[in-house]
Image: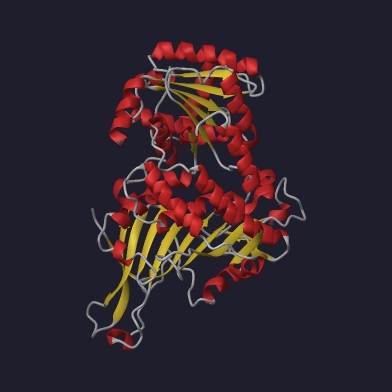
Amino acid sequence: MSDKRHEAFYQEGALFFIFGATGDLARRKLFPAFYSLYREGKLPEKFAVVGLARRPRTNEQFREDLLASIHEFARYRTNQDDEQWARFAAHFEYMSLNTNDTSGYRELEHVAQKLESKFGIAGNRLFYLALAPDLFGSVARNLQEGGLLESAGWHRLVIEKPFGFDLASAEKLNEELCSVFKENEIFRIDHYLGKEMVQNIEVIRFANAFFEPLWNNKYIANVQITLSETVGVEERGGYYDHSGALRDMAQNHMLQMVTMMAMEPPSRLAPEDIRDEKVKVLRSLRAYSPDEVEANVVRGQYTEGEMKGEPKKAYRAEDSVNPASSTETYFAAKVLIDNFRWSGVPFYIRTGKRLPVKTTEVVVEFKTIPDNVYLAQKHTLQPNLLVFRVNPLEGIYIKINAKQPGSAGMIIPVAMDFCQSCQVGLNTPEAYERLLHDAARGESTYFTRWDEVKFAWRYVDKIAEAWKQGRSELQPYAAGSWGPDAARELLERDGFHWWPVNGQEESEVIWAPVRA
């Protein structure tokens, strides 16, 4: 199916509309993604991009901005004298647009028809809203009223998170969008689903016979998902103080990774079948009562501290942050999935700002050998681990117990490490490249469906409501630390501990790199 989609896209082409074309997302991610796709032959010559924003720019200025973006952020390098660059840049035009002015959309329709005629595009149109979410509904209506959804081909809407602030606001937003677009035309981006190693999770699980039989509560002790950031809120203080770690990271990125780890094998490798299985996981999440939230969820906020010898100010001292803010910059939770496969297995998730390292990792800890049998009687055996390294280095490693070479039977942990970034280099496709290409082909597997969003909000809202009732104390943690002590205690109560991340394994582990 994916080959047919690619062939259709290549033959028919598409016209891309980038709303918010002068913004940070377009500059850092979208324009470099277009260029990489073009360089790799994944964009046909039958394409065009219309950049849209309030700011007045000429086509020449817009293409200068495009070149600067690619110089700074793209995987491939170019210069203004490059013939290939000239061909690429010719596909980009700019138009100043007030998103609330309906007459501007009618003018945009004329621009679209001109570009489709120029590049032989068959009326396929993709609208990418790199805008504030409160504009999604009005832009969608204006696209309809301006005649932009009347072309002969398909029409798709790509939107960024956050999709609502809670379930009620998400439902309202969804109603607005679905009054214009069908559900299968709406592509909700969670860029973590575009990351190489997140997509690799299902391949490792379902393409290897020695993992899937063990992927259940009989053999797995716990699963740990860490998404840590070294930065503070930077210039996002105003937005972040309204959102916090729970809504900014847990509701989307972290719960999506939980579904990838916990989903059942789909009956077919079709987008809807895969997403059906993810929804089943979200429906099975144990919804906590206020008392259970207090016992199983940790919320923290960074105070001043030191990172790499540099002092860092507290969250409440950041620009645009309320000096008395109770917004969490750290979130950790014990997530339970009440189904036959995972009953009793805790999924521990944590995310935070101003943590020691930037990393995203998933650790699967297998159950240990019983203490009273064979080698476990004489040796302290470490649990086996399977680790997915998502970011910044991509890779997988497995930790097992083995005899120490030359010893009289001493057992030590050995880690077999496949560093994908080491093998293929850091020039792997960015998440936005994959997702942009998928949206253009109509491949919806790694986009979130409405019912996924709904059940994720339903779970998160229970936690937010308990916090609103004052059922969970805000825990301070120093910038540069691994978060509040309560996060460590959350695992210790169950007899576990957080495993080191980002290659910071224990010193006694012997490493055995896996070569391609």
Q: Residue furthest right?
A: 324
Q: Nearer the viewer, residue 62 or 201?
A: 201
In x, y percent, where is residue 40? Answer: 32, 31
Q: Is residue 130 visible?
A: no
In x, y percent, where is residue 363? Answer: 42, 63
Residue 115, quarter of picture: top left
Residue 212, quarter of picture: bottom left
Q: Is residue 36 visible?
A: yes
In x, y percent, where is residue 469? Answer: 73, 62
Q: So how many labels did they put on this image?
A: 0
Up the image or down, 334 lies above or below 35; here it is below
**Residue in view at x 59 percent, y 53 percent:** 458
Q: Nearer the viewer, residue 340 or 228?
A: 340
**Residue in view at x 39 percent, y 72 percent:** 507
Up the image or down, 268 lies above or below 142; here it is below
Up the image or down, 437 lies above or below 483; here it is above
In x, y percent, where is residue 70? Answer: 45, 31
**Residue in view at x 59 percent, y 60 percent:** 331
